[in-house]
Amino acid sequence: MAKLVPTNETILVAGGGISGMTAALEAAECGKHVLLIEKSPSLGGRVSQFHRYFPKLCHPTCGMEINTRRLKANKRVHILTMTEVTAVTGTAGNYTVNLLTRPRYVNENCTACGACAKAVSSEIPNAFDYNLGKIKAAYLPFVMAYPQRYVIDPSIVGTAEGEAANAACAHDAIDLDMKPESFTVNVGAIIWATGWQPFDAAKIQPYGYDRFTNVITSVEFERMMDPSGPTGGKLLRPSDGKEARNIAFIQCAGSRDRNYLKHCSRICCMATLKQSTYIAERYGDDPDAKVSIYYIDIRAIDRFEDFYQKVQADPRVTFIKSKVANITEDESSGDPVLHGVDTEGYHRYDNRHDLCILAIGMQPSVRAEEIATGMHGDANGFIETNDENGAIFAAGCAGNPLDVNRSVQNATAAALRAIQVVNRIAAAEA
Amino acid sequence: MSDRRMAVGNYRNDFLKEVEANVEDGEWVKMCMQCGVCAGSCPLGPYWEHPPQEIFMMIRAGLRDDVLSSESMWMCTSCYNCIVRCPRELPITHIMHGLANYAHRLGLAPKMNPTRRFAKLFWNNIAAGGRANELKLSLGLYFMDGFATGIKKSLQMLPIGLGMLKTRRLNPFGLLAGGNCKDRKGIQAMLKKAKELEDKRKGFA
Amino acid sequence: MAGEMKLGAYICKGCGLGERLDCAELAKVAQKEGKAQVVREHDFLCHADGLAMIGNDITAGVNQIAIAACSRRAKAEAFTFDGVCVTRANLREGVIWVHPDTDDARETTQEAAADYVRMACAEAKAMRAPAGNPNRGGSKRILVVGGGISGLTAAREVAAAGYEVLLVEKSDELGGIARHLYRRVPAKEPFTEPQETGLAELVNSVCSNPHITTLINSTIAQTSGAPGRFTVEIASTGGNNRSETVGAIIQASGFTPYNANALTEFSYGRTLDVIDQLGLEKLVAAADGAPITRPSDGKPVKRVVFVQCAGQRSADDGRLPYCSGYCCNTSIKQAMYFKDADPAIDTTIIYSDLRTPGNGEDFYRSAQRKDITFTKGKVSTVTPTAAALKVDFKDLILDQDADIEADLVVLATGQVPNSGIDIETSDEAQAAAADKSILNLTYRQGKDLPQLRYGFTDSHFICFPYETRRTGIYACGPVRRPMDMAQAMDDATGAALKAIQAVENAAAGRAAHPRAGDLSFPQYRREGCTQCKRCTVECPFGAIDEDEKRYPVFNESRCRRCGTCMGACPVRVISFENYSVDTVGAQIKAVDIPDEFSEKPRVLILACENDAYPALDMAGMNNQHYSAFARIIPVRCLGSVNTIWITDALNSGYDAVALMGCKHGIDYQCHFVKGSELATYRASKVDDTLKQMNLEPERVQLFEVAITDALRTPKLIDGLVAKVIEIGMSPLKF
Amino acid sequence: MTKQYSFYPGCSSETKASAVNYMTSVNAMCKTLGIALNEIPDWNCCGASIGYAEGGELPRHAMNARNIALSEKHNPGQDIVATCAACWLGAKETQRCLQHSRRLLDDTKTALSEAGLGKDYKGEVPIRHMVEVLIEDIGYEALAKPVVKPLTDIKIAGYVGCQTNRPFGVAGESFENPKYLDKLVETVGGEPAKKYDQKVTCCGGALAFSEPEKSQAQIRKIVESAYDHGAEMIVTPCPVCQMNVEIYQDQINARYGTKFHMPVTYYSQLMTVAYGGTAKQAGLDGNIIRAEKLEKIAAKPAK
């Protein structure tokens, strides 16, 4: 990573999740200059919050390590974290982009030695763990975070805690006077890789996510299953910290539903099948371990069918073709009770579980029309492939609800689309 | 629930078309994606022989008699739970009303179904004078099955009736008056016209 | 070796190193034992001051640098100096953060640090700065094999980036399967109606592009060479053969519709009125707007039934085990052909899981709105009767056996990839299928791309979907994975980038993914080579061929620099300038081995740098302690581990050796595909050697480790040390 | 300042009808709040949901359209306000359906002509529930101002029921867990049973008549949960809910051996008492199960 003066032969990549990293790296490894910006303090996005991938059950951190190593070795990618796009104007080959960098209060001197965190006692909700746990107000967002640099939370700036952190730093890396910085860059093409956010589960009122402690989302569950996550990888339910053994998954939580998201989010079936294996793995032959998957259609497309069949073969996993009507809570135990009808032959159920996981739908973090005037998106806000979008190209889930593999594929394609633009500029200027 | 497995069905699309043409909001039936949320949401669900989503499938399968003679739709309490939860925004409550109405009009609805009989009573009660006469309605309900049963039911309901009377929430003279709009005639003519138009639309004329 | 080598060793005292370690002592070690000509301590080495200090030394002639500070994974950008060799002694994550800050531990902690300084110096001295592969080709032209939607898109996209394209299509017309499609599934809002395929425009854009040369009626008779310098023999049905040079290859050989003749239960082949989806497209195209008629008797179709998953998602022999993904949307589209023409035609789709991801849900809704009937069921048979076809099925919702009559039945049968020869099969089987080859590679390891599963040439990596095992050759479209047109076009665009990247890398003499930019490359000492062929057989990327005398030919641009060949070589003649049997061997030798009675065993850990080494770093960051008797050396991949390191280590008095690498097997996580698997195999052979040395077999262990194993790796190390204490110190300490 | 509304009281609120006490308390409450209710002249029954079987589709729309037309003709510019859930829902549904179907609109107008209102239906007037008027037009803060006798020491379960809640409901409230009754209870100084979990359970509606066993099983859950959550009283915005939940308690006790004696009140009764009204003004004499705690407060002089 090096200093970079952006020109109209530079590609701006907005978003440093796996799609943005991929687009940036693939373009840079073709010899292009890239400015990669990320809103949060470190790269990696949602993928870094996953415990495992389907269908291989390998760890996303592994690919992230390769990608960060590629970044460290590549001088053509310039990274700005805690930075957001505030405005985009211009046309293909010549965009003016306004950026805003929030203060990190830590400069590049930081060696990630951790002395500041030791000096600070106040804690903030841990956003990396979807606020399920807490983290010190001077923190490295997660152990694999890149750039490997701490962050001072604004809540302790101007307090004794902030000063203590500053005093503890032996490397002159803390600067509590940092201010938000606005600036403008000129670029030739833009790859929009701001990814997705989980649908707001509280809006699915019949499932009572906002009322019942033991109804959680799939993304939260994923953090719980991570050994470095809020429960140390243990399947402890939030209400009483008891080990949950009888687990329900509700598919299409928010998706395929005109009341919420009308599209199918594509990944949730596979995510649930994957997560069902966590439970099987945790409990081995424990006869009390049970997984119930409530679904409308299981969408295990292409070779993923193998994975579906494998899970189907597990006697601990039951598939119930039913959109759960609603959840109530057994007040004495805190158990969620799922009500509905298994439509394959009409069987009514009132099933009590230890924990219920909502396979939550995907929606774009930034809607197409919010990026720049005239941007074309679909009805759900995902960016369309459309010539009228000029040289602003979607990569990954900003354009479609995609799994990781397809996101990376799409990001690679986006990198080429951007390269085509800057190559035309270069050819014209040569 | 008895063995609900139906005989081998020979699927035709005719009934779906009939429903689309003649049943209130019947054109929505095809939009069901068989998720079953309606079936699970119904407060009287356990009493439905065929829950709404299954009825939709039966319509698609051409099981006309099974659907129209079913008691199921008559279990609808009009609570609208199914409507607000349906991911396809099907107006299920209305479709159930529509199917019940259609079956009733065709004379295929179960004759002794109490809700069917009460509903008829109710409508006739309000259609007569434009407003509901609660006393007539209750007595009509109790005497539906003849005088003796009526007396028995009335006695069962006597404490409630007395309570209502005592709190002045029931008009003891309601048999004679009450429940009438001023423009009774206009209302009756209006309803006659509406029925006529509907009959024509739905092939009853 | 040109120029004088001068080693500078730099000891950082920041991040608590100065407090925990006797850095002056470490400086002495670097000077005396590490033989560093320049040794400097610094309070904050990664700070601009420290870096400037090193820079000045480089200007003054230092060209080998040992940094004794944090892990090589930290501050990597700061400690990168062009043109010189840099090694890292991991004193922070690898020493002070994993050993307790107690008086008891001080001595062993200091000893560990001193060893790492010795190792870093020794490694640096054994390294040479690489300058890139000299045997590079300069062709930047891209060959696209296949002129269907994927190939046409790839060609168009490559050309749009300013590169030349050679497009080869075996039939007499461009367009592939898409030529037969009447319409395609919508790719735009509102996702409700079938849309034009757009094929004519695509073909036109390719044919009119001056950067694209198109050869029809042509196949690839032979492909040899490497990225940047592939030589491709192209055979034409007209006999007009030619030889072309290209820099990279995109294989877009597409799919063949599943042969439905096997589906006897559906009467395919028994009656003309049971057809597959492609058959219907042809029927509709032939009708050209007129009512669609039955093939058998020409009567108009009034009732049509679509059978989903026909011959798919089945474990039965001769059926497709996978879901082809596109067929639900296709049946919806085809049912619309009928409904849009005449709403009175009955269309029924019988499915078990309707799979319309993303905005396909809108298409599904649109179909329902058009009165297309969806029935969740399983079709058992289709039987021709006098007047019609009888479709028997189990209605899964009504839980009853049912039947429906149809004039026409359409089977959704799925895609079979055109992937050529399966190079994992026997030589005889390959020879028998020789005419099926797509690429006819002259590679030692076979004529076509390795297949992942079910004949698809997909990447095994979720994060890296384009990583085929043949550098510079990228598959795209349905040959890679069953897919629809929209996905194929996206996929082709991505493959186009990878091909362009491959030619750029090849021209610069640097490695492709995952060691992108690596300038080192394998070299071998021909005079020492015994022509044993292990390297050519074991290279996971098929990079190494054999010359006529059966010596290895490395084809550096095909190489991914994993070092598997180096690990394979029994006579240790293969090396990289900055990574060799010597660079690791020197580190192993540099460690100070206390005598047998010291009660200080030494355990060598050879850790994969991709996953195990980061996991150990994470252990450090989480303050997970492990034995101070372990000495850890990162390796490029366990595949690069030469067993000589293990035996040398044991011979020189180490008490145990552990290899830590990635999971292997069907869901392997090795970034170099076969490295950890080969290491496992090789390590199993060490047992014999151990017996000869009179050592217990427990002294050599191989651990499968994931990158997330920050808590587990310390336990593995401690367990091994405990095992050593249990079985006793090595008798081989001198 | 007095706000003018076009009022659709509905059959049950007539003199000596089942919800007359609702009407009494609404009148008292509105007086305090400056809400003027101008009754739609000669309004008719909405047809209720149960009218479907015999009435069918169009006749029911005609019934509701007549009320809307009368309101638009005689009370122009005034929102229609209903106190009964079914009346509100029926009118609103008709308005929606006619907006979406030209055919239905034309047919309805044809039918309306028979009642002399063929040209009077516009279908533009907002149709509101009284609760909406309170929350949206007046606001919790203003609703709290006239409180002179806060309902301290009464724990009240807010039972919203079905048709006030679904399918239209009150803006910003959830179909599954509406909170406005709890907020209204708080507004008048009472303690809401916030965890009461049967607030949207169906009481059986009209099926209380035709399917008493099934409905009473529903009502039992509704009352039982109120007890379980410590409530001393149920409050509801719907006359059908009020009646069903209140009057069958003895039968339920006989059927299930329960000992229910749970007063079921209207929000308007709570407010009338809190605003200093007498038990009579609040229609408390209309409750079969007397809301004794409310009566006591009503009897006490305001502080």
Image: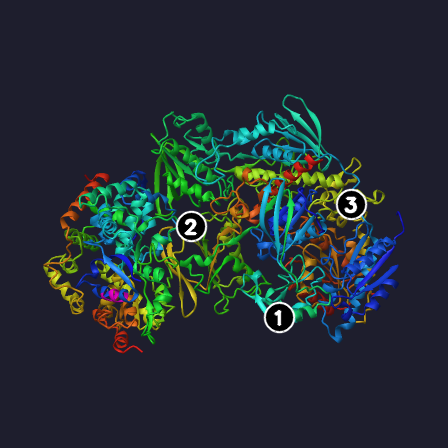
Tell me where the magenta segment starts and ends, as one range: D24-29
Which chain is indicated by disc 1?
A: A
Estimate the x, y position of residue A257 in percent, counting from the top left: 42, 50
State whether discs 2 and 3 lie on one chain.
no
Residue type, mark 2 in image: Asp
Q: In 3D space, how far apart are the residues under numbered discs 2 and 3 (Cα atoms)? A: 56 Å
Residue matched to label 1: A159
- Front residue of D197/D67: it is D67
Secondary structure, mark 3, is loop
- Front residue of C233/B8: it is C233
Residue positioned 75% across, 45% down in the render: C534
Residue matched to label 3: C522
Which chain is indicated by disc 2?
A: A
- Say whether residue C65 is left or right of residue C536: right
State whether discs 2 and 1 lie on one chain.
yes
Tags 2 and 1 in contact by the CB under 8 Å rule? no
Name the outermost residue toward the front: D1
Secondary structure, mark 1, is loop
Estimate the x, y position of residue A191 in percent, counting from the top left: 60, 45
Q: In 3D space, how far apart are the residues under numbered discs 2 and 1 (Cα atoms)? A: 47 Å
- The numbered mark at residue A110 is none
- Say whether residue A384 is left or right of residue B124: right
Residue matched to label 2: A257
Q: Classify C44 as above or below C150.
A: below
Q: Classify A152 as above or below C178.
A: below
- The question of residue D296 being in magenta is answered with no
Residue type, mark 3 in image: Pro
Q: Quadrant of the N terminus of chain D?
A: bottom left
Residue positioned 61% across, 51% down in the render: A99
Q: Quadrant of the C terminus of chain D?
A: bottom left
